[in-house]
Image (cartoon, helix red, strand yellow):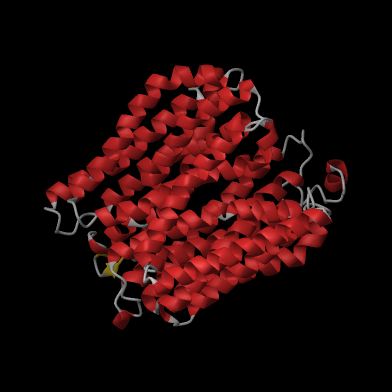
Amino acid sequence: MATKEEIVKSIPQKGFFGHPKGLFSLFFTEFWERFSYYGMRAILLYFMYDTVANGGLGIDKTTAASIMSMYGSLVYMSGIIGGWIADRILGTRRTIFWGGVLIMLGHICLAFPGGIAFLFVSMVFIILGTGLLKPNVSSVVGDIYSTNDPRRDSGFSIFYMGINLGSFLAPLIVGAVQENYNYHAGFSIAAIGMAIGLIMYKVTEKKNLGLAGVKPTNPLEPHELTSILKKTTIAVIAIVILVVIAYFLDLITINNVINFFTVVGVLAPISVFIWMFTSKKTKAEEKSHLLAYIPLFITGTMFWVIQEQGSTILARYADTRTDLSVGSFEIPAATFQSLNPLFIIIMAPVMAALWMKLGDRGPTTPVKFSFSLLFAGASFLIMIIPAITSGGTALVSPWWLVASFFLVVIGELLMSPVGLSATTKLAPEAFAAQAMSLWFLTSTVAQALNAQFAKVFDKVSEVQYFGFLGGAAIVLFVVMLLISPWISRKMGSIK
């Protein structure tokens, strides 16, 4: 296997804004992947609950929102499998390509009117494909720079900009196509976007990426492969038997499937924590770090519970409770899905400059996490005002949603950039490779919980719903502030 130095030497080091040419390939691959994913997601909820006469599936709004949340939860959970396949079998380059192929097939399924069966087949393809592609693209970005290359951080910033540009443009374009034509035309734009990304990746990868990601970093030995195939076969057979039994007992319903994966989503990180904490490979100091990480993980989960409802509860609010008329023009409801990446693009440089100016006087990691909850809570509490003034029925100004998305983005910029950094620093050395997957599990748990919260939205008033979750975030904000000194002590020398 090539060394880090050999990999870097095999890559043209100048050619994309002063960065390695490989950044061009990875930037546009992830740009189009995010374009396709967020374009699809911008209209998927509406497609599920719109009437059949309008080209939708006619699923009730509550179930549609639960499915959306469960979908997001499984997308993030699948990254664990994608990372393992890249590390042990295919290498990151081939894993990225086949992930893109599966994503494209998923969007193609939605581009044709195949009913609810095509919807679930599409979801399986996109869940698996995103798990293969997303974590591994980020990994290859790190591979194209030497460890001490001063361009490394700015390279990741450029890459992150690609993610947000794709996420920003997709809802605008796909939403407009859906409004002017139909849902399937909108989904076809997402499929075309992923196809463009794949073509650009294959055309440029050999020249621009050199040896990066060609080989798996920890390839399976023959005896390991045999053991894994045996265990996988047994597991598949067991699952098939359980599914058949559930089918004959009439237990396979959408609601039961959602409940099952909610339990899986919550138990996954608990299992990982117990596994790490009880491992003989985890040192005493590292166990202290894990204890410090638990409240950070809970904070991240609470934050994503609110942030991720931008594509479910707030997306539905945009469609059914918001006055979208501007003169004779009707704003597509999907447009609001562009607000989050737009505000990130605008505010990220401002926040970065602030932390640079504050330097060592800046807030600690636990304090940043704490204040992320203050803004997340405020983003929901502010929605109480239009709920009261409208009586819960009259259409409200779209500016309330704009304000809500803006507040939650401030919270995201306080927490998200430092979340992965804190995870990699606090994870035990023996489990360093699993650190990125551990952080993504905060979103897995959050969206698994949102699948249940979606069922509550129609059973309580808007004041109660937004007030309870917003209030819970504020309470946890206060608790986190109070225990921040304890967390810092448990972190020890980690800053």
Question: Measuring 43% from the left and 74% from the top, which residue is drawn there?
Answer: 177
User: Is 183 in front, or is 124?
Assistant: 124
Q: Does 59 appear above or below 22?
A: below
Is residue 35 something that shows in the picture?
Answer: yes
Q: Does 312 appear above or below 178?
A: above
Q: Position of residue 316 (x, y in %)?
A: 30, 60
Q: Position of residue 43 (x, y in %)?
A: 40, 67
Question: Measuring 32% from the left and 38% from the top, which residue is drawn there?
Answer: 377
Q: Position of residue 41 (x, y in %)?
A: 44, 63
Question: Measuring 80% from the left and 52% from the top, which residue is drawn there?
Answer: 219
* Residue 212 shown left or right of residue 473 in the figure: right
Q: Position of residue 349 (x, y in %)?
A: 52, 38
* Residue 188 shown left or right of residue 376 in the figure: right
Question: Measuring 42% from the left and 51% from the top, which residue is drawn there?
Answer: 263
Quarter location, residue 288: top right
Q: Which quadrant is home to the C terminus?
A: top right
The total number of labels drawn is 0
* Residue 374 shown left or right of residue 244 in the figure: left
Quarter location, residue 335: bottom left
Is residue 335 something that shows in the picture?
Answer: no
Q: Does 103 appear above or below 354?
A: below
